Amino acid sequence: MSEHNINLIRYGEQIETDVESMNDGMFELFDDLCDMALSRVYNQTPKINNRFDFNALNKNEVSMFKNMWLLCLAELMFYGMRKKPGINELKKLFYKTVYQEISNDSVRQKIMEKAKLIPDLIFDNKNFVENDIFSAPTANQDDGDPRNKGLGPELSSLIVKTSFGQSNNLGPILVEIEKVVQIEFNNAYGHCSIACSKFTF
């Protein structure tokens, strides 16, 4: 087995890896979950003109969505892994990987500006930092529809507003899109935090 670099993994134990492999695995996992979220966004497009419309989202909007999604999930994982050796190296490599994938300079610049807000959103949310509350419904809404609050909705809103906030096509369904992205982002956070917590590097 050592010839093929196969490691035995016993239930409940940490999995040893290296920074490069961790970076590749995180990128692939987050990207797959992002594709699922984007498919849910596309499923909302018939509400615009009664037909499923791939052209409702333009290329730059999709690029911003994907990269903001990657960075928001990554910063949450970095927060959870903040005491692990090698975390600073992993962060640098992940950001380098993300920015290298962006071919449009104006999109890259906007993503870099918005990415600066993510760590502050995380550390400023006391319910998350002190009580591990990522997302929670609250009542007392005028329309009777419980509102979702917490860090999950804040980051989801940042992703949606950065990506689609100026879209003429998606304006009529932006509220529905934000609700869908909140659900998908919360699910992604749950899956990713469990997966990433198993690794040491």
Image (cartoon, rainbow, N blue to C red):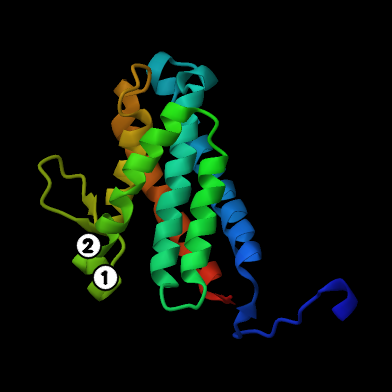
Q: Is residue 148 visible?
A: yes
Single out the residue that lies furthest toward the top: 49
Q: Amino acid at mark 1?
A: Val
Q: Residues within 10 Å of mark 1 (few under 14, many from 20)?
A: some
**Residue sitting at x 40%, y 55%:** 186
Q: Quadrant of residue 121?
A: bottom left
Residue at the location (32% across, 52% down)?
118
Q: Nearer the viewer, residue 143 or 180?
A: 180
| Quadrant occupied by the N terminus | bottom right
Which residue: 36% across, 29% down? 164
Instruction: Please tell me which residue lies in front, 96 or 78.
Output: 96
Q: Nearer the viewer, residue 122 or 170?
A: 122
Give residue 61's quadrant in the image: top left
Q: Residues within 10 Å of mark 2 (few under 14, many from 20)?
A: some
Instruction: Report, in whole angstroms, how far the alpha carbon at label 2 lies from the one at label 1.
Output: 6 Å
Name the residue beneath numbered marker 1: 129
Looking at the image, which residue is at 49% across and 40% down? 66
Q: Position of residue 52 (x, y in %)?
A: 51, 21
Q: Which residue is mark 2?
A: 125
Residue 130 shown left or right of residue 49 in the figure: left
Residue 104: assigned label: none
Q: Position of residue 60 (x, y in %)?
A: 47, 26
Q: Mark 1: which secondary structure?
A: helix
- Is residue 1 in sight in this rendering? no
Q: Are marks 2 and 1 in contact (CB under 8 Å)?
A: yes
Q: Is residue 133 left or right of residue 107?
A: left
What's under tag 2, amino acid-wise?
Asn
